[in-house]
Amino acid sequence: MREPLSPADARILALESDTVRGHALKLLVLEPGDVLDLETVRASVAERLAAFPRGRQVVVDDGEGPAWADAGDVDVARHVRRHPADDPAALRAVVGRLMSEPLDRSLPLWTIDLVGPLADGREAIAVRLHHALADGLTAVRFLESVIFEPHDAPAHAVGIRDPDARPTRWSEWERMPLTLARELGHPGSRSPFDRPISARRALAFVDVPLAEARAVGAARREHATVNDVLLAVIAGALRRRLLDHGHAPRMNAQVPVSLHERGEDAAASGNRDSFVDVSLHLEEPDDLRRLDLLSAQMRARKHAHDARSLDELFHALAAAGPVGALARGLADDPREFALAISNVPGPRVPVAVGGRRVGHVYTSSEPGPRHALRVAAISNDRWLGVGFCVDPDAVPDVELLADAAHDAWEALREGTAPAGS
């Protein structure tokens, strides 16, 4: 049976090239314990894969456009493998290499790589999913369906919208001029990440304590969300690193926004997201004041339903041929946004693989042409795990950027700590 890819999924698939691989990574770091047995993991994945039907399909193109088709018997051994690594640097090198390698288009578009064990007894599982197969929320459904040990906690509702609250199409178009003025009317300076990219990738990660991030947001006069805190951490890191190089340009970030709706089949609905563009306010020297500015922008964008309005616009323009392509090109210009910063809610309860608790979860997404840095975050029950992915030729020393993010987080935490604590 042939099922055409959605326009959004087909567009994402078409972006793949010699330098853009098109997949995202979910990195699970297990607490110390008995080493995972590769064959046992393969058997578990094979047994549970039917719960995520897209994982048993391949992309075919018979001249009528790309479509999903049944892959037949999936050779799980080609998808689930092991790589040695004995320390965090070696682990980062392995996942950087995995991010640089294309997924085999003749197979279902996912892999699961066991990495380690590390010298301290931890082990990692690197899960790659092509973005045409799954957006952030759908990727978490893959983890829940295929990898995590089953549990009774319901899926996280963050990012799931009530279809009854959807604005009418007329109200979307009525607001469109103001939406375009807010979202695409304030280009930034020339981006320092506006560089040609190769297929090479380097990654670094940093953790933010989730409960403390909520407390920092709650302590602001106008309540800031965890996502607002994440944006402030990344903006603070960029200001610190760019000032080290003598400048802090006016820079915008693209923030993906989920449009998944309650009741849909998340495992089969493909990509359902849009975006808003926000100024990172790198000119503001005070970290807490910068958080307030970012939070105010995000509240305004949500109140005005900008993400859904832009989704409607680009769907309409998709049929406009060269005009639509020109509009998409303007929206993707590095002056409009220097980098994308995404945040996906992961498991909100403790989860395990092979009897071992997942201590940390990270995510990483592909940089793109003229956008040589990409930042992505995912939460679990204790941490917000932030991943930085770069072309190391265009953006060297990505570990220093992660260190600067840690410093920015500490400034926010200390700035809201009670006196004397």
Image (cartoon, rainbow, N blue to C red):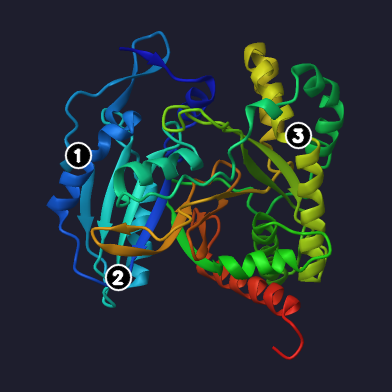
**Picture layout, residue 407 above or below residue 360:** below
**Picture layout, residue 374 above or below residue 124:** above
Which numbered marker is on residue 305? 3
Q: Residue furthest bottom?
A: 420
3D distance between C-alphas at marks 2 and 3: 43 Å
- For disc 1, the marked residue is 46
| Amino acid beneath label 3 | His
Can the viewer see residue 23?
no
Left or right: where does residue 283 sit relative to residue 310? right
Marks 1 and 3, the one that precedes in the sequence: 1
- For disc 2, the marked residue is 122
Q: What is the quadrant of residue 291 in the picture?
A: bottom right
Judged from the image, the secondary structure of the residue bearing numbered disc 3 is loop
3D distance between C-alphas at marks 1 and 3: 41 Å
What residue lies at 50% left-to-right and 55% top-to-bottom?
389
Judged from the image, the secondary structure of the residue bearing numbered disc 1 is helix
- Where is residue 243 shown, x and y percent of the image? 73, 70
3D distance between C-alphas at marks 1 and 2: 24 Å
What residue lies at 38% left-to-right and 49% top-to-bottom?
152
Q: Residues within 10 Å of mark 3 (few under 14, many from 20)?
A: some
| Amino acid beneath label 1 | Ala
